[in-house]
Image (spheres, rainbow, N blue to C red):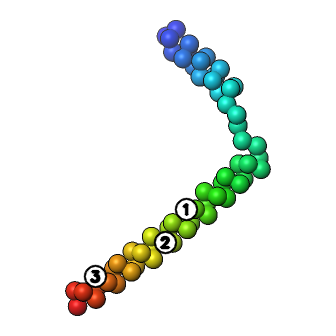
Amino acid sequence: MQSTINFFREVGRELRKVSWPKKKELTNYTITVLVTVTFFAIFFAVVDLGISELIRLILE
């Protein structure tokens, strides 16, 4: 039990050392992630559609 308590104390000490992002940085990072995910989702949807159409043409 004591080792578990020591573990969580150490976790707390380490979390105080973390350099947390400011609100503006966090907003910029969030926007960057959302734009990147949206871009790749659209990109792979278009590629998937293209490959599907190509396979459909080949099989006809």
| Residue 37 percent coordinates (x, y) | 55, 62
| Residue at the (73%, 48%) spot, across then down | 25
| Residue at the (40%, 79%) spot, across then down | 49
Task: Give the side of residue 50 with respect to residue 27, left or right.
Answer: left
Image quarter of residue 60 = bottom left
Residue 37: mark: 1
| Residue 10 percent coordinates (x, y) | 59, 18
- Secondary structure, mark 1, is helix
Q: Residue furthest bottom?
A: 60
Disc 3 designates what residue? 55
Mark 3: which amino acid?
A: Ile
N-terminal label among 2 and 1: 1
**Real-space Cα separation, disc 2 to disc 3, in angstroms:** 18 Å
Mark 2: which amino acid?
A: Phe
| Residue 12 percent coordinates (x, y) | 64, 22
**Real-space Cα separation, disc 2 to disc 1, in angstroms:** 10 Å
